[in-house]
Image (cartoon, rainbow, N blue to C red):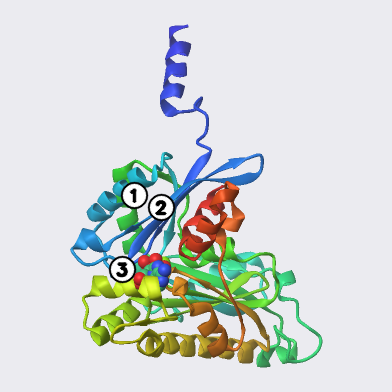
Amino acid sequence: MANIFKSLMDSFKLGLFKKKDDSVVGIDIGSSSIKAVQIRRDKGQAILETYGELALGPYKNVEIGRSAILTPEKLVEALNDLFREANITTKRAAIAIPFKSSLISLIELPSLDRSKVDEMIPIEARKYIPVPMSEVLLDWSIIPRKERELGDEPGTFEEPAYTKKKVETVEVLVVAIHKNILEDYKVVVDKMGLSVGPFEIETFSAIRSVFGHDLSATAIIDIGSGSTRVIMVDYGIARVAHTINKGSQDITIALSKSLGMDFSKAEEVKRSVGAVGKVEGGDLLNIINPTVEFILFEASRIILGYQKKYARSIGKVILIGGGSMLRGMVDIAAKNLELEVKLGDPFKRVEAPAFLDPVLKEAGPSFAVAIGVALRDL
Ligand SMILES: Nc1ncnc2c1ncn2[C@@H]1O[C@H](COP(=O)(O)OP(=O)(O)OP(=O)(O)O)[C@@H](O)[C@H]1O
Ligand SMILES: [Mg+2]
């Protein structure tokens, strides 16, 4: 009897009888700020419990809005502050890996059975991954046939030149994550006592939260602080992702130089006036334009390249990331890209009190990754 009692006690200690934590916090560690969103599942619905964002600059003695790469120890400090301020209560976490710490390639292989593909990928991947294989963690998934059905008419989606001979191929999406970041995140997770599932690259998290069941080709543009990512999603699957080495921080730097104000003031002006107004000393649009147009020009090249390679036309563009919240950005993007452009609205995927709707819609583009990674875990 005593023994049974003891094992029961052990079970309690192990948490076996504890109600499983129904809430999960999605964490996006961006280069300028961390975002966290806590959601809970209730009767098949994802319910928003709380969310918050914290600028990382101050943890590295630089201004709010600037990119700041923190040590794991500083990151723990920042996360603890954010958890406290946003009232994040769960220890169950889902964390996104920054795109810059990963590599995503679409590899085309002759059609083989699954086990052969699994054998070939680690060998094939060496051609695409410019760092030693010992430094990365590799994962891959075969793109299902139905999502890449060959059109009969030439020139459709899956009709690259060499399949015209009707050689059967499979496409495999290969992802590699630098082990360094996994080690850093492990320190963070251990120090904070979090329980985490598998990590996910931010790209896939964002797609989950802003992309519906649309099959048409769509570009998601994530305008961050130091860089911008362009992700081509087709048949609901990420197929191509590129980085542009400019982001919203470059706009702040341009404003600060042109208007002769410090970074923090320029950041304030950028966020309040955006690309639609004037301030003393200059027309903001003229100062902002070179950076914005550079980003959009590069994005356009990626989009056109995709269209050409796969003979698919791009239906629309979804903007996410803090940089997309620049006032006037959607119109400028639509004009430059000559495509329909919308802001991502990831909070649409979660239930929240109606009075919060306008606030959530406005903040949404920033939280696409955090919500997406949390939804995966639910
Ligand atoms: N309302 C706004 N108007 C204009 N810019 C804004 C606004 N809000 C935030 N930003 C800008 O967005 C940028 C931060 O975006 P975001 O939080 O998506 O980047 P990040 O996730 O930290 O960076 P990355 O994804 O590149 O690692 C900053 O440069 C910030 O100035
Ligand atoms: Mg980001």
Element type at mark 1: helix
In the rendered image, the vertical position of residue 78 relative to residue 337, given as above or below: above
Residue 191 place in picture, x, y as percent? 29, 44
Disc 2 to disc 3, how far (Cα)?
15 Å
Task: Answer with the quarter of the image where residue 15 lies.
Answer: top left
Q: Which residue is mark 2?
A: 52
Residue ID for mark 3: 65
**CA distance for labels 3 and 1:** 16 Å
Which of the pair 2/26 is nearer the observer? 26
Instruction: From this view, report whether residue 97 is shown above or below residue 314.
Output: above
Sequence-wise first label, 3 or 1: 3
Closer to the camera, 155 or 172? 155
Whole-percent x, y for residue 48 in the image: 53, 47
Q: How many marks?
A: 3
Counting from the top left corner in percent of width and height, residue 233 is at 60, 74
Label 1 neighbour load within 10 Å: few <14, some 14-19, many 20+: many
Mark 3, ligand 1, within 8 Å: the answer is yes
